[in-house]
Amino acid sequence: MEPGVLYALVAFITWGLYPLYWKQLNGIPDMQLAMHRIVWSFVLLSIVMTFKRQWTEFYRGIKSWRILGLYTMSSIFIFTNWYLLVWAINAGYIVETSLGVFINPLINVMFGVLIFKEKLFPWQWVSVALVCSGVVVCAVAYGKLPWIALTMAITFALYGLIKKQAPLSALHGMTLETIILLLPALVYLIYVECKGTGAFGHVSALMDCLLIGGGVVTIYPLLCFAAAAQLIPLSLLGILQYIQPTLQFLLGILAYGEPLSMFQLIGFILVWAALVTYTVDGLVRSRRDHKEVISVQTPVSEASDVPFTRVEQAV
């Protein structure tokens, strides 16, 4: 198996199995869980930065108010996403969180159209129409707007939008984000400790280990994802990413017995149809573009000698 594919699988399977991990901590207040994620993520990133001797380069890269401003905004969006995830899992909304992850790629597409004035091809417009229809059906089925799914999808899309403009590497960017969030997290945890409601050190050794491990399960898949993005085509990465919400959806239904009406299922089917349509259209378009490049670069007399595997690798 290619290392890039392996990194991607580790990242998406870890995220997909998040409910199994955070459900073990459902007796701890959600805000404390989110704050512990920040603190222990910072500890892990500090170890990685020290091991890789990256601190000097890191300090050189952040000497700009623009960079600090960009990463302050991205840290707010990622914290919102982190907090909402652990709250939703422990409140019994695993299925709805999976919907948020399913629609996130198409929220990115909408941002591209609205913000960057990108043009969509006909089948891409079909995908957008299908996902909008799916959200409307889910809203009717739930009796309310699926705000958890939409908030998770939009905050992560905004996070990605800011990161697209940010100049730091994935490791340095994550380190700066946790540094920005670290002081508020420490202040909050010290406050609840002084109030006598702090969980760390007062429940059990297992809970303490799980809280510390929250930093590992937060940062390790992010590092794997960053490595995968550098090693495999984005089209393949885009297909593999659906492992995460699929696992979450199945866990919500099969492991935790969350309700799913036929009407809700229809909404999910419309979203899945949108993803399939968009993904297939992207793969066909990518393959066609690469074939056109190869046909231009390869003389006609040699075209029949190009091995199929080389074309596949190019795609």
Image (cartoon, helix red, strand yellow):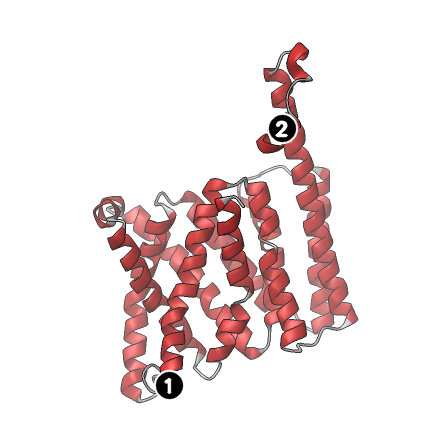
Near mark 2 (Cα within 10 A), the count class, few <14, some 14-19 or many ≥20, is: few
Residue 145 in sight from this viewpoint: no
Question: Distance from label 1 to label 2 (Cα)?
Answer: 56 Å
Near mark 1 (Cα within 10 A), the count class, few <14, some 14-19 or many ≥20, is: few
Report x, y in % for residue 111: 56, 48
Residue 12 marker: none
Say what amino acid the circle numbered 2 marks: Val
Most foreground residue, 151 or 227 = 227
The image quarter containing residue 35 is bottom left
Q: Residue at x 59, y 16 (%)?
A: 297
Query: Which residue is under mark 1?
Result: 204
Residue 311 marker: 2
Residue 300 in sight from this viewpoint: yes
Most foreground residue, 44 or 180 = 44
Q: Residue at x 23, y 46 (%)?
A: 63
As drawn, which residue projects farthest toward the right?
262
Q: Residue at x 29, y 81 (%)?
A: 191
The relative height of residue 147 versus residue 302 in the rendered view (above or below) is below
Report x, y in % for residue 51: 26, 53
Q: Quadrant of the C terminus?
A: top right
Report x, y in % for residue 143: 70, 74
Q: Residue at x 54, y 39 (%)?
A: 233
